[in-house]
Image: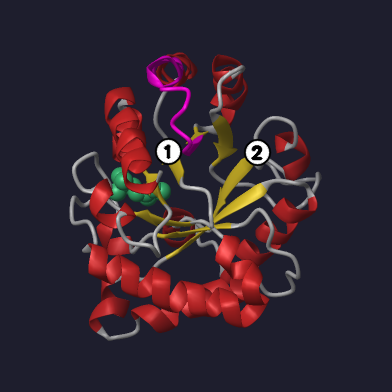
Amino acid sequence: MPVPTIAGNWKMNTTVHEATRLATGVRDGLRMSSGVEIVLCPPFIALQPVRDAVQGSPIKVGAQNMHFEDSGAYTGEVGPLMLQGLCEYVVLGHSERRQLFGETDDQVNRKVKAAFSHGLRPILCVGETLEHREAGRAGAVVAHQLRDALSGVHDISGLLVAYEPVWAIGTGQAATPEIAAEIMGGTVLASLTALFGQAADDVPLLYGGSVNPENVGSYLRLGAIHGALVGGASLDANQFLQIIQATAEAKL
Ligand code: 13P
């Protein structure tokens, strides 16, 4: 049974000072026995301060992106050797990276392999656009993204998959639980099982897209959904804590 997981993707928000304050707020508000894996993904420059702020608590830290090479002439990039020891998780293939920065399935695949080989847990993001969905291609697109991202990977221990339909991100138009469950319990699980057999059963599947304290329970009551990747609502410690609490109530 996958571990219920709530990850906060802060995106390009928070100064170092604000990030430290937000992480401290989540840490201080946490009930120690919640049993939910909690991951904070601040901007790169706040990884160390956030790590310091949550030290001694069960909260884990993740990066939002990563280059696939260890080091080299890649101005502005951050590689896996720099993240090792600084965080446990890394969000890869987020639709904003794909759409705004031209990240390809091949690049996502290289990043996923680099994460595994450096002991970082990838939170692999997949999801269709509205255009794909209206054309009846949502499942096919997600299956394709998964297959490409995991090509050449043999051991998926440590993997998490986040299903984030592009049309639901930052729009307030969350996918219905039925849509999320259809893709996650159907397409995603079937694709992972076809590729990796029983190991697929241990992969936490997170829903992302306009998750808030009010709607999170409706996803987590469904067996196919083990957690959430939260954007906007993770920037408010109280809302994020309520999401964690609702997850504990639904899953534990
Ligand atoms: P919102 O929760 O703001 O819709 O963002 C979702 C997301 O992209 C998380 O990675």
x and y, in percent, of residue 169 in the image: 30, 54
Amino acid beneath label 1: Gly
Q: How many marks?
A: 2
Q: Residue at x 33, y 64 (%)?
A: 165
The picture quadrant where one finds residue 166 is bottom left
The C terminus lies in quadrant: top left
Query: Is residue 68 in view from this perspective?
Result: no
Q: Which mark is residue 40?
A: none
Foreground residue among 239 and 127: 239
Q: Residues within 10 Å of mark 1 (few under 14, many from 20)?
A: many
Residue 214 shows in this picture: yes
Residue pictured at 66% horizontal, 59% vertical: 112
Which residue in the structure is indicated by mark 2? 88
The answer to whether residue 98 is left or right of residue 196 is left
User: Residue 167 placed where, x, y %?
Assistant: 26, 62
- Image-based side of 210 in relation to 73, left or right: left
Specify the segment rendered in magenta. Answer: 24-39
Q: Is mark 2 within 8 Å of ligand 1?
A: no
| Residue drawn at (38%, 60%) of the image | 164
Quadrant housing residue 89 = top right
Which residue occupies the foreground of this view, 219 or 173? 219
Q: Earlier in the sequence, mark 1 or mark 2?
A: 1
Residue 27: say if magenta: yes
Q: In the image shown, does 195 or 141 lie closer to the viewer? A: 195
Q: Residue furthest front?
A: 252
> Callout 2: 10 Å neighbours few (<14), some, many (20+)?
some
Residue 184 rendering spot, x and y as whole percentages: 40, 69
Q: Residue at x 43, y 42 (%)?
A: 6
Q: Amino acid at mark 2?
A: Glu
Q: Is residue 17 above or below residue 185?
A: above
Q: Which residue is mark 1?
A: 8
Q: Taking 90 as reference, is 190 above or below it?
A: below
